[in-house]
Amino acid sequence: MMGNNLPSHSEVIQLYKSRNIGRLRLYDPNHGALNALRGSNIEVILGLPNVDVKHISSGMEHARWWVQKNVKDFWPDVKIKYIAVGNEISPVTGTSSLTSFQVPALVNIYKAIGEAGLGNDIKVSTSVDMTLIGNSYPPSQGSFRNDISLPYALFTAPNVVVQDGSRQYRNLFDAMLDSVYAAMERTGGGSVGIVVSESGWPSAGAFGATQDNAETYLRNLIQHAKEGSPRKPGPIETYIFAMFDENNKNPELEKHFGLFSPNKQPKYNLNFGVSERVWDISAETNSTASSLISEM
């Protein structure tokens, strides 16, 4: 939504439906978007923005109000599947001042969802980015900063790039995902499910950001998300970032992550057929961007 030339909310939802896209992520509870979603049967990750985290952490009355205004007022017409409390809050980034408030805010929203009778319908979690993984090379040690080749990132490496014990890695996506699984297991959270709620590739604006590379990545991501990773085979719920190119974003490469141009024309020749229900799209508003459990 961070553009001055984008379609209306209702046009966007019609585009989703026409392309058989069954899920989306909203980075904040934009009521125009939520109203457009009524009756669409599209499942939603609903974000609670960072600017609200401290307020929500301060008391249950604030959490109850937020849930009433942004969840109950739209349920069940809007199929909210997850609530992401905070976005990329981290002790090592510019959001460090919020870290002490995040868990209390998450707990308060979780309780408020339960009180609303929706505890069996809506999961409550948060969105973390990969900067929280201090070491992920190899993945079982749950860090890759150097020596990442383009084929490894694009799922096109012809051979094994990383041998991690008995597990073999040919792509960066698997290595990043398994590093999160390993880190979660080390903290006693091995049974917690992971959703990749943001993964994409820019078509311009930086080294390697080309139309061809973006199409290669997205096509391979769609196929690979059905297979899972060496540590946990099986489909992994994955959301593609983002629906549209957004001309009000910075730096330059952030303007070019869209699957569609603002005129609703697809940028890539990708299959959005019924068999491709893995296509879940992120729709960013003026909040910071990222993912429910893991940004890739």
Image: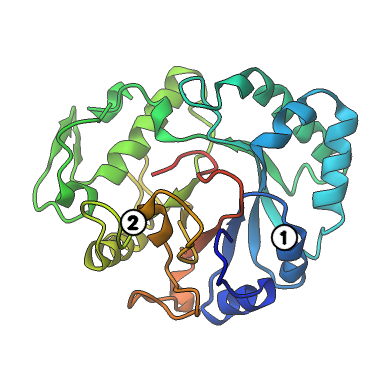
Q: Amino acid at mark 1?
A: Lys
Mark whose residue sits in front, 1 or 2:
2
Identify which residue is drawn at 64% across, 73% down: 13
The dot on residue 79 is: 1
Sequence-first tag of 1 and 2: 1
Q: Quadrant of residue 229?
A: top left
Is 139 in front, or is 213? 213
Is 123 in front, or is 291? 291
Instruction: Label 1: state its secondary structure.
Output: strand
Identify which residue is drawn at 40% across, 33% down: 130
CA distance separating discs 1 and 2: 28 Å
The dot on residue 289 is: none
Instruction: Label 2: state its secondary structure.
Output: loop
Q: Position of residue 281 (x, y in %)?
A: 51, 61
Q: Amino acid at mark 2?
A: Trp
User: Which residue is labeled 2 in the image?
Assistant: 201
